[in-house]
Image: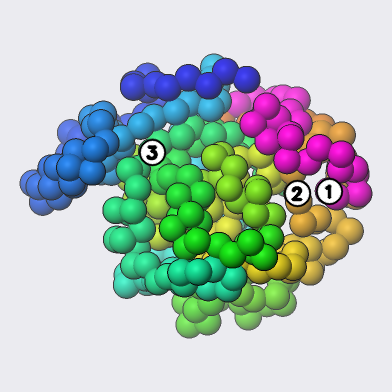
Amino acid sequence: MLIKKISDITENEVTDKSLYLSRRDFIKRTTLTSAALAAGFSFIPNAYGGLNIVKKTNMAIGEKVTKEKAAKSYNNFYEFTTDKEDVKKLMENFPTDPWEIEITGLVNKPLKFSIDEVKRFAGTEERIYRLRCVEGWSMVIPWNGFSLSELIKKCEPLSTAKYIQFVTKLNKKHMPGVRSNVLDWPYIEGLRMDEAMNPLAMLVFGMYGDELPNQNGAPVRVILPWKYGFKSIKSIVRIVFTDEQPATSWNIAAPDEYGFYANVNPKVDHPRWSQARERRIGRFGKIDTLPFNGYAEQVANLYKGMDLRRFF
Ligand code: MTE
């Protein structure tokens, strides 16, 4: 697996928004840039968005970035609807400001962060990752945020903390989908501690150089590129450190279909369909799915000795 830093992305793969940035946006960006410089980050001008990206890493070398419009209008967010093309519209009035994330459980330092504090916490990186949905489609997306491990270290987990659980906001007034019992609400997900500490695991508050739009999990979510998309939980409000494997929404709903680990694995089929190939949004035909979604070199050692059919 090639990991290359890139300081540029080809023009046809992105939309240049700098052309129509307002004066207010310009001032905001300039101020943030000074803050990033003061914090010791080298600043790479961002050609196409409103966030100040201090480092870019392409982890989907040779693959075309999915068109921004497609990535922002074909979404899974069951708290709103099961229809991927309706999520965006239904989320237009979803309130994300103010927003706090609470970190509790087996830690020395329980913390509460506002979303602005989260953004200032570490330099914003851009990482181009493949994301493979369990349903058989995939995208290549530039995510903006930083390694989840940065935040975890800050809370000083106790040695007894073996797992970490994430909880999505439950807002019955604005989430029409929670009236259905397709899942237990709030949406919950979890990771083993060493998975959460892996540098690939990302806390994300932007994409394509801009703030996350509501439908993609505003204001903050997790992205785990080696796992099926349902592990990449959106709009989180709570992170809990535990000593036991936490329950997860899809595993509660259908334990035979959605395991706790959910590592992308072309050799282990979903009981109702094959996982060997995938449809890349924006491309014709299908392509082979790679073990761990192509990130085996970075993460396979986390599962050494485990029977991946049993721990699917
Ligand atoms: N997070 C919450 N809270 N609710 C959801 O329904 N869907 C998951 C995941 N995170 C989901 C969620 C699934 S199934 C996928 S494939 C990804 O979000 C989709 O993320 P995207 O819309 O940004 O592509």
Determine if the magenta segment contains residue 236: no
Residue 139 in view, yes or no: no
Q: Residue tagged by mark 1?
A: 312
The front one of 155 and 204 is: 155
Residue depicted at 63% across the width and 80% down the height: 179
- Between 274 and 8, which is closer to the camera in this rendering? 8
**Range of the magenta residues?**
283-312
x 41%, y 46%: residue: 145
Camera-nearest label, 3 or 2: 3
The reply to whether discs 3 and 1 touch (Cβ–Cβ < 8 Å) is no
Q: CA distance from mark 3 to mark 1?
A: 30 Å
Find numbered disc 2 in the image and state the secondary structure of the residue it sits on.
Answer: loop
Image-quadrant location for residue 52: top left
Q: Residues within 10 Å of mark 3 (few under 14, many from 20)?
A: many
Q: Residues within 10 Å of mark 2 (few under 14, many from 20)?
A: many
Q: Of the two numbered discs 3 and 1 on the same chain, state the one appearing first in sequence.
A: 3
Q: Secondary structure at mark 3?
A: strand
Q: Is residue 171 above or below residue 304?
A: below
Q: Are marks 2 and 1 in contact (CB under 8 Å)?
A: yes
Distance of label 2 from label 1 (alpha carbons)? 5 Å
Q: Quick one: label 1, few (<14), some, or many (20+) residues within 10 Å? A: some
Which residue occupies 90% across, 43% down? 307
